[in-house]
Image (tube, helix red, strand yellow):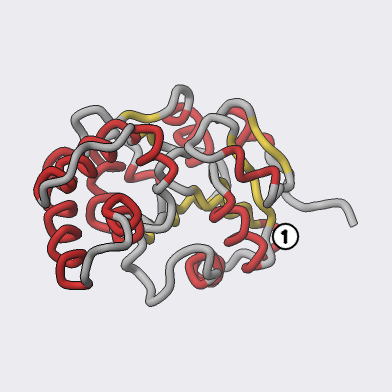
Amino acid sequence: MLLIFDLDGTLIDSREDLAISTNATRAYIGMEPLPADLIQSYVGDGAASLVRRALGPHFSEDQHSDALSFFLRYYRDHSLENTKLYHGVGDAVKALAQGTDALAVLTNKPLRISADILEALGIGSYFFRIFGGNSFPQKKPDPIGITTLMAEAQTGSAQTWMIGDSGVDIQTARNAGVRACGVNWGFKPEDFAAVPPDLVVMHPSEWLSLPAYSPS
């Protein structure tokens, strides 16, 4: 079975470092800080979208590009100051990797930062592939990441799960024709009302019991 994990809000709690880095970017261009909860609502579509939402609509493309470059530099240097695995994630991922499951990460966060965080938190080696928001021409919810991972793992849609905390992850699964598992501890579980997953888990240990196929 192929299990594809989102990163922020699913495997890692990165909200504090993202908020600090976003507000550092706002300070860089002379803006006041935003509440962390508001910044959290901007996460999910990649760094460029996060910065654009945090700055608002009244900035040119050149200003946005400059702010994005600052954000990426700052976040790369500070991405592990407060970020941690959600409780139970490490044990669950290790147990899954010792079985017959193929594990991968598909995130809209830039690849280099994502891989560095997973390695530093001790679980990077358990994933046969990590794809970031700059790995393909399109980001989630485009299905290209999932379809590429299925081809590499030689796994069919009936044996594939996309696991995430937001509507973006669930819609990505739908677009790829695979099943979706939501987690109830992430950044945007309220999205599930509009884009419901096939099931929602309350603890990472439940990933070990995901069914290999859906009843017809």
In this rendering, does residue 129 appear at all? no
Residue that extends furthest to the bottom in the rendered view of this protein: 137
In the figure, 89 relative to 155: above or below?
A: above
- At x 62%, y 52%, the residue is 161
Secondary structure of the residue carrying numbered label 1 = helix
Please name whichever residue, 36 or 46, is drawn nearer the observer in this view of the structure: 36
Mark 1 residue crowding within 10 angstroms, few (<14) / some (14–19) / many (20+): some
- At x 38%, y 73%, the residue is 136
In this rendering, does residue 3 appear at all? yes
Tally the marks.
1
Please name whichever residue, 100 or 87, is drawn nearer the observer in this view of the structure: 87
**Which quadrant holds the C terminus?**
bottom right
Residue that extends furthest to the top in the rendered view of this protein: 87
Residue 130 appears in which quarter of the rendering? bottom left
Residue 170: percent from left, percent from top: 62, 53
Residue that extends furthest to the right in the rendered view of this protein: 216
Residue that extends furthest to the front in the rendered view of this protein: 58
Residue 207 appears in which quarter of the rendering? top right
Amino acid residing under circle 1: Ala
Residue 171: percent from left, percent from top: 61, 59
Disc 1 designates what residue?
A: 158
Residue 159 appears in which quarter of the rendering? bottom right
Residue 94: percent from left, percent from top: 45, 34
- At x 53%, y 30%, the residue is 185
- At x 48%, y 37%, the residue is 187
Residue 163: percent from left, percent from top: 57, 47
Please name whichever residue, 139 or 177, is drawn nearer the observer in this view of the structure: 139
